[in-house]
Image: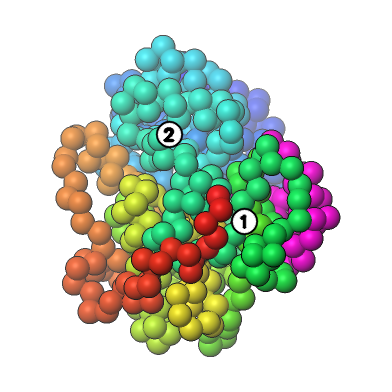
Amino acid sequence: MPDLLITPGSLLDRIRRKVRQLAGRPDPSPWVLYPHRPAAARGRIDFVIALDYMTMNGGMIDQLHRAMSRYGLSTLLVNRQNVDRVLRLARLGRIRPAVFLDLCSTRNDPYEQLLHTLADQGVHTLRDPSQTKWIVKASAHRLLQPHVPVPPTVVFAKEEADRDLTVAERELLGDRVAIKPSCGGAGRGVRLNVEPTLQNIADARAQDRSDDWLVQRMMPFVMLGDRIGYFRLYNVLGHLNVMWWSPSDHHYATFTWADLDRYRLWPLLGIAHRIAQITRMEYFSVEAAYTGEEGPHRLCLIDYVNDQCDMDAFNPGCPPPEWTAWVCERLALRTYQVKHRIAVEEQCSVTLAGAPPVALRDLPMDIDADLANRADAKIFGSERT
Ligand SMILES: Nc1ncnc2c1ncn2[C@@H]1O[C@H](COP(=O)(O)OP(=O)(O)O)[C@@H](O)[C@H]1O
Ligand SMILES: [Mg+2]
C-alpha cells in the first residue's frame, strides 16, 4: 500500500536532477522521501512530516530519516507533490501513522485538513487541532497575559473599524509600536517601530482585512555581553531549551548553563515552562527579549506560540545542526513510544547546549523569579482583547 503514496521520480527525472545539480543549477522542486525499507515492506508508515520547502531543509530530513531508522521507524514526507493523495488516503483510513508533525500548514489548506483528518482518527499529532488557539496571536495574547509577561497590546478584531487609540490605550502602548497580524508568520505583514496613528493602523490592517491585528508596545532588546538579549525558547517533547537568536539577521547561537547564570536568565525557563503547562503543547518555540527594564517586563515574551519550529539545518541563519539532530532524536523516541504504547512519564527537564538533561525540580534557581507579580495581570498587557 505505501507505494500508492509515493511518487518516486522516474529514472529520467533523477538523471535530469543530477545533471542540473552538477551544472550548479539544482532543481528546487520538492522531492519525496521513501519510507525506510523494512517498514515499507510491511506497509507501515510510522512518522509523517508535512514540510513544503524541501531544498532548504534537505539536511534536516536526512537527520530525521536517520534518527527514525535507528528505531526501525519509517518516515513519509508530505509535500505539494503528494499532499492531495495522502489526504485522500487518510480520509479513507488507509494511512494511519503513529505520529504526525505539521511544519507547513496555513489556514484551511490541504495540510491543515490532513492534520484534522489524522487527529480525528486518533493519530498522535504534535499540535492537536484543539490547540490552534495558542498559535493565533490574538487569542494567545488574551490567554497568556495572566501567566507570563507579554507586551502591552491592543487587539483590533477583524470586524472592528479602524480608529484612533483612546488616551488610555495610547498611554499603555507608548509612542512606538509593532503592528502585526494575528495569523502571521515569518515576519509577514509586521510593521515595527511606528507611531500608533490611525493612518499607520489602517495601512497595516489593509494588508489583510480577514485577520485580527495586534498593536503592541515596541519592547527594547538590550545587549548582554556581545549578544542581543533575544531568545528562542523551546519545549521539545518535555525538554525545555533556549537558543540565542538575533532578530536582525536571524542567526542562532548555542545557549549554555553559564549564560543562564551569568545574566540571571532563569525566568526564561519559567516562561517556557508555564507556556508548556498551560498549552499542553508538546513541541513549540516562543521568542522572548531581555528588555533591560527592572520588574515584570525584564524578560518579555515577544512572539507567541509557534508550532512550526524552524528545523532547517546546514544553512546560514538556521539552528545549529547538532540542535536539529537532537530534536530529530526526540521525535524518533516519541514516535517509538507512541507506536509501542510506552507510557511517558510527565516530567519536564531542561536541556541546554547538548549537556545531559536536568529535571526541572532539581534546578537550584527560582525559575519563577520576576514572574512573581503576575497575579496582577494588568501589568503585563491591556485588558482589551
Ligand atoms: N512588541 C514588539 N516589540 C519589539 N519587537 C517586536 C515586537 N513584536 C515583534 N517584534 C519584532 O518583529 C519580529 C516579527 O514579529 P513576530 O511577532 O515574531 O511575528 P512572526 O510570527 O511573523 O514571526 C520579531 O521577531 C521581533 O524582532
Ligand atoms: Mg517570530
Q: Is residue 276 left or right of residue 179?
A: left
- Asked if the stretch drawn in magenta spans residue 68, the answer is no
Amino acid carrying label 2: it is Pro
Residue at left 51%, top 46%?
A: 139
Residue 7's quadrant in the figure?
Answer: top right
Above-or-below relation of 358 to 223: above
Q: Position of residue 63 (x, y in %)?
A: 43, 50
Amino acid carrying label 1: it is Val
> Residue under circle 2?
129
Range of residues picked out in magenta: 184-210
Kindly report the distance in space between the C-alpha atoms of the residues bearing marks 2 and 1: 26 Å
Q: Earlier in the sequence, mark 2 or mark 1?
A: 2
> Residue under circle 1?
154
In this view, the residue in front, 107 or 320, is 107
- Of badges 2 and 1, the one in the foreground is 1
Residue at left 51%, top 53%?
A: 141
- Asked if the stretch drawn in magenta spans residue 197, the answer is yes
Residue at left 48%, top 26%?
A: 114
Above-or-below relation of 187 to 377: above
Above-or-below relation of 146 to 230: above
Residue positioned most to the top: 92
Q: Position of residue 128 (x, y in %)?
A: 39, 36
Cβ of mark 1 under 8 Å from ligand 1: the answer is no
Residue 147's quadrant in the figure?
Answer: bottom left
Cβ of mark 2 under 8 Å from ligand 1: the answer is no
Which class describes the residues within 10 Å of circle 1: few (<14), some (14-19), or many (20+)?
Answer: many
User: Does any portion of residue 235 appear in the rendered image?
Assistant: no
